[in-house]
Amino acid sequence: MMQKNTMIQVATAGEALIDLIAGPDGRFEPCLGGAVYNLTRALARQGIETLYLNPLSKDRLGRQLAAQMVQDGVHLAVPEPVLPVTSLAVVNVDGHGHPDYAFYREGVADRATSADELTQACSTAEGLQLVCTGALALSPDDALTYLPWLAAQRQAGRTVVIDANLRPSVMPNLDLYRRHVLTALQYADVIKASDEDLACLALPGADAMAQARQLLKTSRASVLALTRGGDGAALLTRFGQTFAAHETQPLTVLDTVGAGDCFLAGLVTAMLAHDLPPDWGAMAVATPVAHDLLGSAIASASLCVMQRGCVPPTRAEVRAYVARGGLAFTG
């Protein structure tokens, strides 16, 4: 819940659900999850005053989702639980730690909201600088919920961050889904996408970096953060700069659930620390600033993948990880 007189820095909107993660023995382990839920927790654990905008269910699973958020320091825009049930995701993880999802999301709590409700919650959040969404919120079925809200946030002068984080396996009309995602990304100041996301969007380009440049060129965003798994990550700016970083030693990866969400939390945390304006990529970015952004983001993701499920690191853990000097930077 939001404490009176709290200055909110970030508001997040999107799914909160239970991941049923398949183990080697075929049994499913229930874990609190959802990309936006993970991002929200990750931001709060790094010391960011974060407001989660969507409602949560009054069922047992919804109460668990809410309790973990509050424990991590998240503020709930809808503190009273709602009647619809909690979303479920069945997650199968392959031998490389990559998850595949099946979702159960009809008549669920986190979708029981509207553009007006999201916008009103943001308008009353004193100090709000930045909003984040993505993943399942980019479904065409929820266009009337999220697109007007995103437009209102841009109009209010807040930084809009959108994580493509595509889920093509659960979208019945892939062409419609691609078109809608590209439409939604037009509201972003900062886009985060993986190499797999860009391949799914069928963008022109010989490789992920070329596809990222094409997406940045055809959007209104000033920055694109590209994640490339074990090959690290890059920041591309509208000004024309490219910065990249990667781990110098291989990691012991238990699974990658939540890695991209923690990456984005680390990036947003560093953006706020440097007090960057919404269009910060339209002008020259100082190399130390870019390296700090990438270092914070990659360290957050690396700390996540070395644990089972999504266990977001604290800001102190991220800083200690960066200080070890295990990252190499270019650009």
Image (tube, helix red, strand yellow):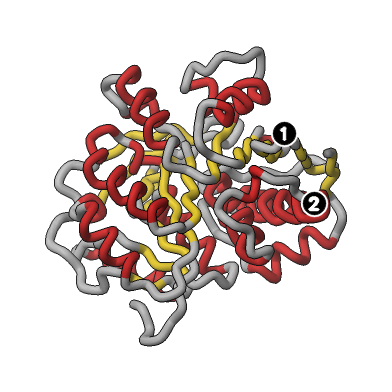
Say left or right for 109 vs 165. Answer: left
Front residue (pair 188, 26): 188
Q: Which residue is mark 2?
A: 286
> Residue visible at 53% across and 63% down?
43
The C terminus - image quarter: top right
Rendered view: 74 above or below 252 = below
Amino acid type at image mark 1: Gly
Rendered view: 217 above or below 269 = above
Residue 149, image x, y percentages: 30, 51
Say left or right for 266 vs 75. Answer: right
Residue 63, image x, y percentages: 27, 68
Judge the density around disc 2: few (<14), some (14-19), many (≥20) Cα neighbours within 10 Å: few
Front residue (pair 297, 20): 297
Q: Earlier in the sequence, mark 1 or mark 2?
A: 1
Q: Quadrant of residue 270?
A: bottom right
Q: Quadrant of residue 53?
A: bottom left
The N terminus - image quarter: bottom left
Residue 275 in sight from this viewpoint = yes
Say left or right for 192 vs 209. Answer: left
Q: Which residue is mark 1?
A: 240
Residue 29, image x, y percentages: 40, 50
> Residue visible at 84% across and 39% down?
330
Rendered view: 146 above or below 288 = above
> Residue visible at 76% across and 55% down?
289
Residues at marks 1 and 2 touching, judged by CB atoms closer than 8 Å: no
- Secondary structure under tag 2 reads loop
Q: CA distance from mark 1 to mark 2?
A: 13 Å
Judge the density around disc 1: few (<14), some (14-19), many (≥20) Cα neighbours within 10 Å: some
Residue 15 in sight from this viewpoint = no
Amino acid type at image mark 2: Ala
Rendered view: 198 above or below 106 = above
Q: Which mark is residue 206?
A: none
